[in-house]
Amino acid sequence: MPDRSDLTWLFFKTSGRVSRAAYFLGGLLVAIIQAFPLYRFTLVPEGSAESNMWSFIFFIAFIASLWSNIALAVKRLHDLDKPGIAALILFVPVVSIVAFLVLCLFPGQPGPNRYGRRTNEPAQS
């Protein structure tokens, strides 16, 4: 099991590189975390206190997952030896689907590059 600092790096920091598998699985976990409060929200009566609580939890999960998706995409782009700013393409409808598939399917650059020595670790300062 990875330690807390590894998970913090994976989901919230933009330095280093991640592999296709780490990107896909990290994104899947983020999607599940985002979907759970939305699912719970649909099960409670509309306008109730519980409904308000689950909608607030969903909002918090959405904001956190938005940054996590960006951080994962930046590190995946780094593995392809591309600048992280290109992650903004994920906000363009339709193009984002193609970009996601490219990030999931294209292998990263083997060996060290300007963003890190190895895949799945933070860049060394």
Image (cartoon, rainbow, N blue to C red):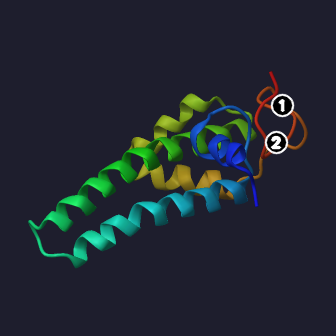
Image spot of residue 104 (x, y percent): 64, 57
Residue bearing the label numbered 2:
109
Residue that extends furthest to the bottom in the rendered view of this protein: 43
Residue found 78% across the figure and 46% down from its top: 120
The amino acid type found where label 2 is placed reads: Gln
Is 57 or 124 nearer to us in this picture?
57
Rate crowding at label 2 as few (under 14), some (14 to 19) or many (20 or more) other CA atoms within 10 Å.
Answer: some
- Indicate the quadrant where residue 46 lies: bottom left
The quadrant of the rendering that contains the N terminus is bottom right
Residue found 39% across the figure and 66% down from its top: 35
Between the C-alphas of marks 2 and 1, the distance is: 7 Å
Residue found 57% across the figure and 40% down from its top: 12
Residue that extends furthest to the left in the rendered view of this protein: 47
Is 57 or 106 nearer to us in this picture?
57
The quadrant of the rendering that contains the C terminus is top right
Image spot of residue 59 (x, y percent): 30, 51
The amino acid type found where label 1 is placed reads: Asn
SS at mark 1 in the image: loop
Is 82 or 46 nearer to us in this picture?
46
SS at mark 2 in the image: loop
When the figure is inspected, residue 66 is found, relative to residue 114, above or below; the finding is below
Residue bearing the label numbered 1:
113
Mark 1 and mark 2 in contact (Cβ < 8 Å)? yes
Residue found 61% across the figure and 37% down from its top: 74
